Amino acid sequence: RKEVEQDPGPFNVPEGATVAFNCTYSNSASQSFFWYRQDCRKEPKLLMSVYSSGNEDGRFTAQLNRASQYISLLIRDSKLSDSATYLCVVNEGGKLIFGQGTELSVKP
Amino acid sequence: NAGVTQTPKFRILKIGQSMTLQCAQDMNHNYMYWYRQDPGMGLKLIYYSVGAGITDKGEVPNGYNVSRSTTEDFPLRLELAAPSQTSVYFCASSQRSTGLYEQYFGPGTRLTVT
């Protein structure tokens, strides 16, 4: 079983759509959780941290379920500029473990 | 601040050649990391450092070496390049390693070994 596993994608959605990405992690001792965004052929950049109580940043909402070892990212009112690969990332003992990423393509 | 810088941006190596990928950060971060990313895959940790003079292996260290003589610089050395080392290499740094923190990545080095 992969340490961090994401929906395989790609997701192709129209502008204005709501899209949800799912991620599961295998180590119940994982300490903290993040979503990173990676544009084509660019470096990853932190999108948002994921808190146990769930957190929102504008159109983006992240949820964590420690009991199910499950993380989600919801994007509302998708924009063309949201097209990218979204990486689920888990902190295990100070090391980041990356999922393989889910590609999102938002079309006009 | 330039953040995290990497050189070169691109490189083609022949099998058996060696090279050093350079990484520098100007944020005074103690923690630095080297990752590789193969097509369609997540990033894999090669080596990391928690401060000058201290390095440790990550998930995929074979075929690589690192050194950390200063806080700013963290070069990655490839000895005897192999086609399996064809990848995109990212260097990153962070202020700390625990809790809610952010890793800042350099723009990457695209390496092809033929």
Image (cartoon, coloured by chain):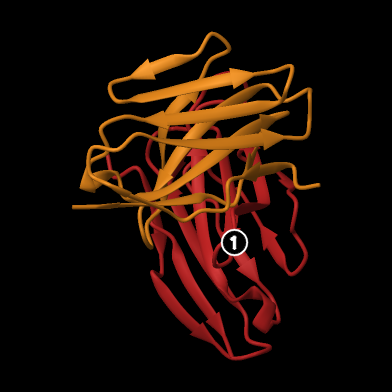
Q: Colour of chain A?
A: orange
Q: Is residue B66 left or right of residue B101?
A: right
Does B46 appear above or below A27? below
Q: Label 1 belongs to which residue?
A: B76
Does A70 appear above or below A80? above
Does A7 appear above or below A64? below
Mark 1: few, some, or many residues within 10 Å (few <14, many ≥20)?
many
Q: Position of residue A59 (x, y in %)?
A: 29, 25
Quadrant housing the C terminus of chain B: bottom right
Q: Position of residue B17 (x, y in %)?
A: 63, 86
Q: Colour of chain B?
A: red
Does B95 appear above or below A15? above
Inspect the image, locate mark 1, and give the three-letter code of the amino acid beneath it.
Leu
| Viewer-proximal residue among B47 and A84 | A84
Q: How many marks?
A: 1
| Viewer-proximal residue among A70 and B35 | A70
Q: Is residue A101 left or right of residue A93?
A: left
